[in-house]
């Protein structure tokens, strides 16, 4: 296991647009859950808008062979995290997003972030602290870290940020109360909020993915 996230370039898989348009392409950055890797969310991409450049990111901490995380966590009723790892990953992604824009010819005004589980958690920490880097946030089966709140922008800095929150009502890993608490906090923060709940567990259902794709397509 790497002791700290940081100190090296993040590993990515980049898929160019299936239906490229004139000019710079919009991008969707995929952030996986704990113990997964940069291949884990690629199965979603055939159902996503073909105009998007897809950039799937491997989290920086190796937890076991082939399994990575943005921070270590104990799945107790209220998950216990390693805060300095979460903060290091937040900072790393803040530095990384502008490099992605430059390296891949991305439209800097159209960089969307989609995170699942821990990826949603770290994605929220990035987007709510640096909304200038993100055109929209998709949080699937995640939560918002209390430890990250001191870094969040004030309400008038977030009122332009679109956020989609999706959560399963039968989620046994991050219960629906986490999704509903995220919804309440995001409403308080003043983002442009879309919330959906689904009859599923800790997963991404076809209906949720279709809803996410429609939400993204409306903003491209």
Image (cartoon, rainbow, N blue to C red):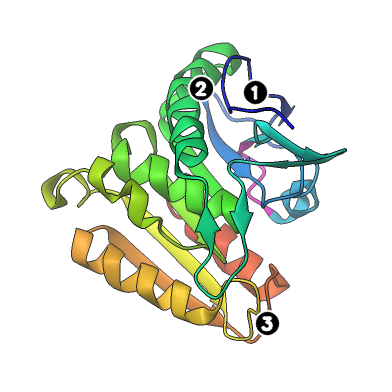
- Where's residue 219, x and y in %? 42, 49
Is tag 2's residue or tag 3's residue first in the polypeptide sequence? 2
Residue at the (48%, 46%) spot, across then down:
123
Is tag 2's residue or tag 1's residue first in the polypeptide sequence? 1
- Where's residue 216, x and y in %? 50, 53
- How would you classify the magenta stretch by its main secondary structure? loop
Residue at the (49%, 41%) spot, across then down:
86
Q: What is the quadrant of the N terminus in the image?
A: top right
| Alpha carbon separation for disc pair 2 and 3 | 33 Å
- Where's residue 159, x and y in %? 20, 52
In the image, residue 103 lies in the stretch drawn in magenta: no
Q: Residues within 10 Å of mark 3 (few under 14, many from 20)?
A: some
- Where's residue 19, x and y in %? 69, 36
Query: Mark number for residue 10?
Result: 1
- Residues shaded magenta: 48-53
Q: Badges 3 and 1: C-beta atoms under 8 Å apart? A: no
Mark 3, residue position: 200
Which secondary structure, mark 2? helix
Disc nearest the viewer among 3 and 1: 1
169 over 47 or under it: above or below: below
Quarter where residue 133 is shown: top left
| Alpha carbon separation for disc pair 3 and 1 | 31 Å
Q: Residues within 10 Å of mark 1 (few under 14, many from 20)?
A: some
Is tag 3's residue or tag 1's residue first in the polypeptide sequence? 1
Which secondary structure, mark 3? loop
In the image, residue 51 lies in the stretch drawn in magenta: yes
99 over 128 or under it: above or below: above
Name the residue nearer the viewer: 79 or 18.
Answer: 79
210 over 11 or under it: above or below: below
Q: Residues within 10 Å of mark 2 (few under 14, many from 20)?
A: few
């Amino acid at each position: 296991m790497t002791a700290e996230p940081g100190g090296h370039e993040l590993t990515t898989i980049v898929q160019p647009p299936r239906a490229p348009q004139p000019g710079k392409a919009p991008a969707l950055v995929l952030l996986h859950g704990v113990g997964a890797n940069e291949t884990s969310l690629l199965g979603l991409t055939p159902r996503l808008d073909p105009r998007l450049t897809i950039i799937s990111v491997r989290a920086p901490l190796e937890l076991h062979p082939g399994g990575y995380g943005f921070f270590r966590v104990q799945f107790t009723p209220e998950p216990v995290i390693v805060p300095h790892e979460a903060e290091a990953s937040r900072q790393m992604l803040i530095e990384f997003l502008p490099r992605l824009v430059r390296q891949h010819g991305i439209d800097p005004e159209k960089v969307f972030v989609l995170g699942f589980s821990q990826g949603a958690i770290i994605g929220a920490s990035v987007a709510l602290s640096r909304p200038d880097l993100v055109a929209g946030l998709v949080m699937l089966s995640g939560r918002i870290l209390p430890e990250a709140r001191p870094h969040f922008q004030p309400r008038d800095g977030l009122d332009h940020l679109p956020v989609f929150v999706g959560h399963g009502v039968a989620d046994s890993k991050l219960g629906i109360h986490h999704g509903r608490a995220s919804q309440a906090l995001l409403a308080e923060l003043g983002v442009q909020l879309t919330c959906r709940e689904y009859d599923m567990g800790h997963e991404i259902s076809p209906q949720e993915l279709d809803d996410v794709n429609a939400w993204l397509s409306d903003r491209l």
